[in-house]
Amino acid sequence: MKQISYVIQFRGTAGPKEGVEGVLSASTRGSASRISTAVDDDAVDATIEAIAGNSVSFESDVFPNEDGSFTESGTIDFGGGNSFTFSTRGTGAMGPSADSNLTHGGICWQVDSGAGIFDGATGIITSNFTVSGGGDVVDNQWGVIFLK
């Protein structure tokens, strides 16, 4: 088994899924990037720099619960026939944030199946995200994937 990791910031939208009551749909895109974090006595600051590489797409269905928890399933497509499906491990949580214009949440997913380099893959992805009142999503993901 080979272990790979990815860190990508996805941006896009989320809102009610057309024709399905009580389900939300998220659609975001990210790209190859270099992420660095500077730490000193006065600040912590992350920088995301786009680099050459494929665009990555994310599509999911979100199933919210009344208590702010939710489950989710979907697909992440890295291009070139390389993609995987995922589903929730446990439940995610979302609710108000310190910024009154944003909802903040987090969730953990597992890889269920894959194609291309992800055929037979397993792994876990964490997501820390915000959603604006207008449905704009910023989703920061870290995946640790094992390839067969």
Image (cartoon, helix red, strand yellow):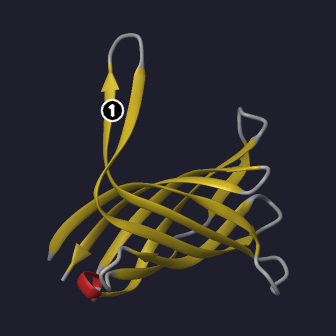
- Across and down, in percent, residue 140 comes to 48, 52
Q: From the viewer's perspective, is 10 left or right of 80?
A: right
> What residue occupies the far left of the structure in this picture?
1
- Across and down, in percent, residue 3 comes to 19, 67
Kind of residue at badge 1: Thr
- Across and down, in percent, residue 36 comes to 30, 37
Q: From the viewer's perspective, is 61 left or right of 108?
A: right
Which is nearer the eye, 106 or 21? Answer: 21
Q: Quadrant of residue 126?
A: bottom left
Q: Quadrant of residue 48?
A: top left
Q: Is residue 1 above or below residue 125?
A: below
Q: From the viewer's perspective, is 48 left or right of 97?
A: left
The residue at the point 43 percent across, 73 percent down is 110
The crowding category of the residue bearing disc 1, from other C-alpha atoms within 10 Å (few below 14, some 14 to 19, many at least 20), is: few
Callout 1: SS: strand
Q: Quadrant of residue 53?
A: bottom left
Q: Is residue 117 above or below residue 141?
A: below
Count of residue discs: 1
Q: Which residue is mark 1?
A: 37
The residue at the point 31 percent across, 78 percent down is 122
Q: Is residue 73 above or below residue 143?
A: below
Location of the N terminus (image quadrant): bottom left
The residue at the point 23 percent across, 82 percent down is 117
Which is nearer the eye, 50 or 24? Answer: 50
> What residue occupies the far top of the structure in this picture?
42
Location of the C terminus (image quadrant): bottom left
Q: Is residue 52 above or below residue 58?
A: above
- Across and down, in percent, residue 100 comes to 78, 36
The residue at the point 76 percent across, 58 percent down is 68
